[in-house]
């Protein structure tokens, strides 16, 4: 499984790569993760402190604080249990992309090193994550020695894609099976690489919420998880929260280029708590302790991982009305126009009132329905879908090379 982004940096794609690898191992498959790392080539990747995003980004570009998806993600660097199953192809360099700094390798030598490792590794299939990103997959342009599945995460074409379009196109043409994590990601992929695309999703690790312990709070609590950069909309949330008069506290997790400015505008207080960068367990504990998860991004979110994680933790969710968030929410979140401080403040006011009254999005039935919805996007279920994609790729590769 190939990641173009540094395996010891938190980020949405890395979280998906490492989480999917663990889920596949849980199904009985052997998985080796290949990618850049600060340690340098041929060294085992070690554990990382800190976490983003999901992205868990949620506009998943591989950079990001607590963002998985973009996105949001709690950490997901390589932990001790993953070390023996990682091949480090080289060191990353920070490239600006989609409002973030993506930690990718730009070394052709690293790309060729990854290709040689795969060619001589006796693997059944190669799963390339984010084929649009330089340059990890470029070594497979001239010599595709194994069946290949590609997963496209990005929404919006980065500035490097037009410059490298011939290589991006050739990488896409080498794939037997192409997957996008959302309709927005598929639209972006189709502008750079022709072919058919199956739309799946980013997976949620539901088990971590069953295992975790919540951080207690003495008031209704709103949580922000994400890198502190313009496109994540943190300034909009801080201004919207400042308009609220009802008793509540805002937990702000993550870090980034706007942290200092925003902390000066909205200093630490009884109502605003700056948590800094959190590891994966801390992210889980904060999600479980919060009442409302707010995802106020302005743009660039191909998938709503942070939205699903909020639902999995039984938070009410208030988010920007972006295609990636809307698709993931499935009608279980309150969506507001991106960048609209007044609309966000009003939505948060209603959400916090619902928390106190146990009504609306915070009623037991509504929270359970949202949790069930999130479970439909589980990492285990995603792994099972990818096993089918791998089998199709192997069969197509065999037919192509027997002709």
Image (spheres, rainbow, N blue to C red):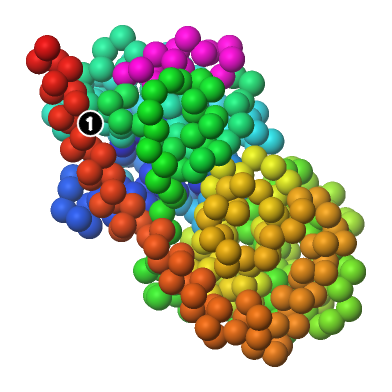
Q: Where in the figure is residue 146, as x and y percent of width and height? A: 20, 24
Secondary structure type for disc 1: helix
What residue occupies the far left of the structure in this picture? 402
Magenta stretch holds residue 403: no
Q: Where in the figure is residue 253, as x and y percent of width and height? A: 66, 60
Left or right of 27: which side holds 214?
right
Left or right of 246: which side holds 170?
left
Neighbourhood count class around disc 1 (C-alpha, 10 Å): few under 14, some 14–19, many 20 upward: many
Q: Which residues are magenta?
A: 161-174
Name the residue tied to disc 1: 393
Left or right of 334: which side holds 340?
right
- Please tell me which residue lies in front, 162 or 271: 162
Q: Where in the figure is residue 47, as x and y percent of width and height? A: 41, 50
Q: Quadrant of residue 252?
A: bottom right
Q: Main secondary structure of the magenta part?
A: helix
Q: Residue at x 36, y 31 (%)?
A: 178
- Quadrant location of the N terminus in the rendered image: top left
Q: Residue at x 43, y 48 (%)?
A: 201
Q: Where in the figure is residue 81, as x and y percent of width and height? A: 29, 54
Q: Residue at x 65, y 33 (%)?
A: 98
């Amino acid at each position: 499984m190939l990641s173009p982004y540094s395996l010891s940096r938190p980020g949405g794609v890395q979280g998906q790569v490492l989480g999917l690898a663990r889920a596949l191992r849980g199904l009985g498959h052997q998985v080796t993760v290949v990618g850049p790392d600060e340690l340098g080539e041929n060294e085992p990747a070690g554990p990382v402190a800190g976490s983003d995003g999901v992205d868990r980004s949620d506009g998943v570009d591989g950079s990001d604080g607590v963002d998985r998806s973009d996105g949001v993600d709690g950490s997901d660097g390589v932990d001790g249990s993953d070390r023996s199953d990682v091949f480090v192809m080289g060191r990353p360099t920070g490239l600006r992309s989609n409002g973030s700094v993506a930690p990718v390798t730009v070394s052709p030598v690293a790309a060729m090193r990854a290709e040689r490792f795969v060619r001589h590794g006796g693997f059944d299939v190669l799963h390339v994550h984010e084929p649009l990103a330089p340059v990890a997959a470029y070594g497979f342009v001239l010599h595709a020695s194994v069946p290949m599945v590609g997963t496209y995460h990005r929404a919006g074409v980065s500035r490097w894609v037009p410059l490298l379009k011939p290589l991006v196109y050739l990488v896409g043409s080498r794939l037997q099976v192409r997957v996008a994590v959302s309709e927005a990601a598929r639209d972006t992929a189709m502008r750079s690489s022709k072919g058919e695309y199956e739309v799946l999703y980013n997976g949620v690790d539901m088990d971590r919420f069953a295992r975790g312990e919540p951080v207690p709070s003495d008031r209704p609590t709103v949580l922000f998880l994400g890198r502190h950069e313009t496109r994540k909309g943190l300034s909009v949330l801080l201004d919207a929260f400042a308009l609220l008069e009802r008793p509540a506290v805002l937990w702000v997790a993550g870090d980034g280029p706007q942290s200092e400015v925003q902390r000066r505008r909205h200093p630490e207080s009884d109502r605003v708590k700056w948590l800094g960068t959190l590891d994966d367990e801390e992210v889980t504990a904060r999600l479980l302790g919060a009442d409302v998860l707010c995802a106020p991004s302005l743009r660039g979110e191909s998938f709503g991982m942070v939205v699903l994680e909020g639902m999995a933790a039984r938070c009410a969710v208030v988010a920007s009305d972006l295609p990636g968030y809307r698709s993931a929410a499935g009608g279980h979140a309150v969506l507001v126009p991106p960048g609209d401080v007044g609309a966000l403040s009003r939505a948060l006011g209603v959400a916090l009132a619902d928390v106190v009254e146990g009504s609306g999005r915070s009623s037991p039935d509504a929270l359970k329905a949202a949790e069930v919805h999130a479970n439909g996007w589980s990492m285990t279920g995603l792994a099972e879908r990818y096993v089918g994609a791998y089998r199709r790729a192997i069969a197509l590769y065999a037919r192509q090379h027997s002709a």
